Image (tube, rainbow, N blue to C red):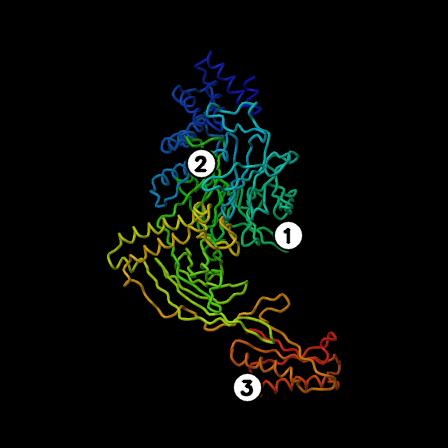
């Protein structure tokens, strides 16, 4: 009965029966061999096979298959005992009774053990730490395929936990979960980040699946996933996609035959802003086993013929679960080939021009002799996640989710502060700031708008970049300041004041004259401080400033401390949540904390500060239009001049309006006037008498403007076809910003 249970895959029952028999027959080599093979199938206690396999070796058991040498070496490898494992792999190869060997991967296993020795001896210069994720992310069941959102605010993963049960952990008393604890449920779960932890996860799909796990998620609204339905052949599932509609995931849609084949696909990710999909498949024509492929999007729902990534990435063994970082030049995947220390290991390759570099193992702090797969990472690379079935003191279930944390020590961040004020009739206006770097990436987190009273603002930005600070008022972009933050900038202070004057044309407020006053900024770098032999003071002062930064973040953004990594990867044009209010304005803690920072700076040697007269790229006076839904971009005002029938002389009323317009045009070099006259359609391209009259009306206006001193280069003449009755006997004047 025990043998039947083993053959049926019921290892829990088989082990239980074998152990009962062992009490009566303690010296049976065959029984020891069968018990060992049961433990080799255990998701929790493979190492329990060691004493049984060792018994076979010590007692020269010839009545069982000699592959116990292979199994013994394998378990030693899993326990990181690589040297002894190599010895027994070699003994298995040299055994005369194994000329026709059941296992043909022994030489590969020896190479992997050698990798384990080498990688284990390398003193990693990285400060990364790897740890298992807490309950209830992990349970005694299998959790796998962690996909972290780009903003690190939620994670999706697959779990085989019982959906209706909250008892997820059963300790380490089982080699196999008993039948009454086994779960038939499979689903994808979602958990939101809460500080440094994650909330209780909840299932996302309601269906009958043999296997389901996420592959890629985009903004919580789109997902690639692998599904194997009960009607599919075992291990013959497919890659599907789904979108959120009305708060729920829609029924998954299978990708076409360019991606899904008659063979097996393992892992997929969409990269290059949705234009490329990378996936793994064991379809014919590859380098061997599972290979990585890429395909380019064609149209809306189609993909090009897949391209194998080639022998640098793919080998004769398996390469699965590709993950392409947000930079589109860093590729992570898992391989069980010659780069591994056992099972599947996660490796990394970077793109060098059009080619991928030779992949490298992520190291012993990430990988193990067990299987590590399904890697994902936030854009800053500070947090990474993967699946492992390793069995150690940390492990909870058969497969668990692990996190790699890359701490930030001595963050290279510049504090940009100072005062920016915009005055209108002597009163300070409430303005907001939009910050972009030279890659046109918008920074919104840790950018605090000027206070309305004194104009004090505060930012935390990475140095070694150029930034544009766009000053906005009532949805109008008033002015752009361009600043350079040199490498190792310690502090950057910017003081700038503007005067805002309303522009009236045709008795309408159409825009503002923005008049900048003198600019002052001061830069302090770490190098300057070090040259003054104040390195120790610098470190202490910088540590204090980092603490103040964290206090500001903690008081103004409750999730900020858990998301400081967002500084490394600003989200393009996405407004991040602020717990205090809907604007960037800080809460009441902001001002006293800034005062503390200013006090810290004031204690520095003032001679270390460099004063300059202006900011790079100061634009001088600028005209800004008032937002209007009725006018095209850059057009600040339009006016139609109508003439009595058969007349082309300018009326007294229109002359007053043109006087105002001419004064406005002469004072500003960045304004242009479009003069539009209308004519009827004519196939012969001849002007009718009405058209000639309209042209004379246009010339009357131009002559009048010229008499008032408006230069010819200040206006453009345009002719348009009469479309409506409004265009009859009319000259359209359109004022726009260049």
From where the camera sits, is residue 488 visible? Answer: no
Q: Is there CB contact under 8 Å for labels 1 and 3?
A: no
Q: Residue furthest front?
A: 426
Q: Position of residue 230 (x, y in %)?
A: 64, 33
Provide the residue designation for mark 2. 132
Which of the two labelled residues, at mark 1 and mark 3, occupies the earlier sequence position? Answer: 1
Image position of 372 with respect to 8: above or below:
below
Which of the two labelled residues, at mark 1 and mark 2, occupies the earlier sequence position? Answer: 2
**Image side of residue 348 versus residue 117, left or right:** right
Provide the residue designation for mark 1. 302
SS class, disc 3: loop
Count residues near mark 1 (Cα–Cα under 10 Å), then give few for <14, some for 14-19, many for 20+: some
SS class, disc 2: strand
Q: Please identify, in this view, whether the residue under mark 2 or under mark 3 is nearer the observer.
A: 3
Q: Is there CB contact under 8 Å for labels 2 and 3?
A: no
Which of the two labelled residues, at mark 2 and mark 3, occupies the earlier sequence position? Answer: 2
Q: Position of residue 452 (x, y in %)?
A: 46, 60
Q: Which mark is residue 620?
A: none
Spatial CA span between label 1 and label 3: 61 Å
Viewer-proximal residue among 593 and 694: 593
Residue 726 occupies which quadrant of the picture? bottom right
Count residues near mark 2 (Cα–Cα under 10 Å), then give few for <14, some for 14-19, many for 20+: some
**Image side of residue 648 versus residue 602, left or right:** right
Viewer-proximal residue among 725 and 138: 725
Count residues near mark 3 (Cα–Cα under 10 Å), then give few for <14, some for 14-19, many for 20+: few
Provide the residue designation for mark 3. 709
Image position of 16 with respect to 523: above or below:
above
Q: Position of residue 674 (x, y in %)?
A: 61, 78
Q: Position of residue 723 (x, y in %)?
A: 73, 74
Q: Residue at the location (59% across, 34% down)? A: 186
């Amino acid at each position: 009965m025990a043998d039947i249970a083993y053959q049926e895959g019921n290892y829990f029952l088989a082990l239980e029966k074998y152990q009962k028999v062992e009490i009566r027959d303690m010296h049976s080599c065959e029984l020891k061999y069968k018990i060992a093979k049961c433990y080799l199938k255990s998701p929790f206690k493979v190492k329990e096979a060691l004493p049984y396999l060792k018994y076979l070796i010590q007692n020269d058991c010839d009545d069982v298959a000699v592959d116990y040498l292979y199994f013994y070496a394998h378990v030693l490898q899993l326990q990181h005992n690589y040297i002894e494992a190599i010895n027994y792999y070699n003994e298995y190869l040299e055994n005369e009774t194994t000329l026709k060997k059941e296992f043909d991967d022994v030489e590969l296993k020896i190479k992997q053990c050698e990798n384990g020795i080498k990688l284990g001896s390398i003193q990693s210069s990285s400060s990364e730490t790897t740890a298992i994720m807490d309950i209830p992310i992990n349970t005694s069941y299998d959790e796998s395929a962690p996909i972290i959102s780009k903003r690190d605010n939620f994670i999706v993963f697959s779990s085989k936990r019982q959906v209706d049960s909250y008892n997820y952990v059963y300790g380490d008393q089982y080699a196999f979960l008993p039948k009454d604890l086994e779960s038939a449920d499979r689903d994808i779960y979602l958990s939101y980040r809460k500080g440094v932890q994650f909330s209780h996860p909840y299932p996302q799909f309601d269906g009958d699946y043999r296997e389901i796990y996420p592959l890629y998620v985009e903004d919580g609204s789109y997902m690639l996933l692998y599904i194997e339905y009960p009607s599919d052949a075992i291990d013959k599932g497919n890659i599907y996609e789904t979108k959120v509609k009305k708060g729920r995931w829609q029924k998954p849609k299978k990708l076409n035959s360019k991606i899904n084949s008659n063979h097996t696909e393992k892992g997929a990710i969409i990269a290059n802003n949705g234009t490329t999909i990378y996936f793994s498949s064991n379809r014919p024509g590859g380098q061997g086993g599972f290979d990585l492929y890429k395909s380019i999007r064609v149209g809306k729902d189609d993909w090009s013929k897949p391209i194998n990534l080639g022998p640098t990435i793919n080998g004769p063994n398996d390469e699965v679960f590709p993950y392409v970082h947000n930079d589109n030049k860093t590729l992570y995947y898992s391989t069980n080939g010659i780069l591994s220390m056992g099972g599947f290991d996660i490796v990394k390759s970077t793109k060098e021009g059009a080619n991928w570099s030779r992949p490298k193992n992520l190291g012993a702090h990430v990988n193990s002799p067990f299987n590590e797969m399904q890697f994902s990472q936030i854009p800053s690379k500070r947090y990474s996640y993967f699946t492992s079935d390793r069995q150690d003191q940390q492990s909870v279930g058969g497969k668990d989710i692990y996190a790699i944390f890359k701490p930030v020590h001595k963050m290279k961040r510049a504090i940009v502060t100072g005062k920016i004020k915009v005055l209108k009739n002597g009163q300070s206006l409430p303005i907001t700031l939009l910050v972009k770097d030279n890659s046109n990436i918008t920074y919104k987190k840790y950018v605090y708008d000027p206070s309305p009273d004194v104009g004090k603002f505060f930012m935390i930005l990475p140095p070694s970049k150029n930034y544009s600070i766009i000053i906005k008022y009532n949805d109008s972009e008033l002015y752009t300041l361009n600043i350079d933050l040199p490498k190792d900038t310690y502090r950057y202070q910017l003081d700038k004041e503007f005067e805002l004057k309303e522009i009236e044309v045709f008795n309408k407020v159409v825009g503002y004259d923005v008049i900048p006053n003198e600019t002052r900024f001061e830069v302090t770098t770490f190098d300057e401080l070090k040259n003054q032999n104040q390195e120790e003071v610098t470190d202490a002062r910088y540590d204090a400033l980092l603490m103040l930064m964290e206090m500001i973040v903690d008081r103004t953004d409750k999730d900020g401390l858990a998301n400081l990594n967002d500084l490394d990867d600003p989200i393009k044009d996405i407004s991040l949540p602020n717990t205090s209010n809907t604007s960037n304005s800080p809460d009441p803690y902001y001002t006293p904390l800034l005062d503390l920072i200013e006090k810290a700076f004031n204690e520095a040697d003032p001679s270390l500060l460099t004063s300059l007269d202006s900011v790079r790229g100061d634009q001088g006076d600028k005209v800004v239009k008032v937002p209007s839904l009725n006018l095209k971009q850059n057009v600040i005002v339009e006016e139609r001049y109508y003439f009595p029938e058969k007349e082309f002389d300018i009326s007294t009323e229109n002359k007053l309006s043109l006087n105002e317009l001419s004064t406005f045009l002469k004072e500003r070099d960045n304004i242009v006037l479009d003069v539009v006259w209308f004519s009827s359609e004519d196939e012969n391209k001849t002007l009718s008498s009405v058209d000639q009259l309209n042209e004379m009306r246009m010339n009357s206006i131009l002559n009048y403007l010229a008499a008032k001193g408006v230069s010819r280069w200040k206006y453009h003449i345009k002719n348009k076809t009469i479309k409506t009755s409004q265009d009859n006997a009319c000259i359209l004047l359109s004022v726009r910003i260049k």
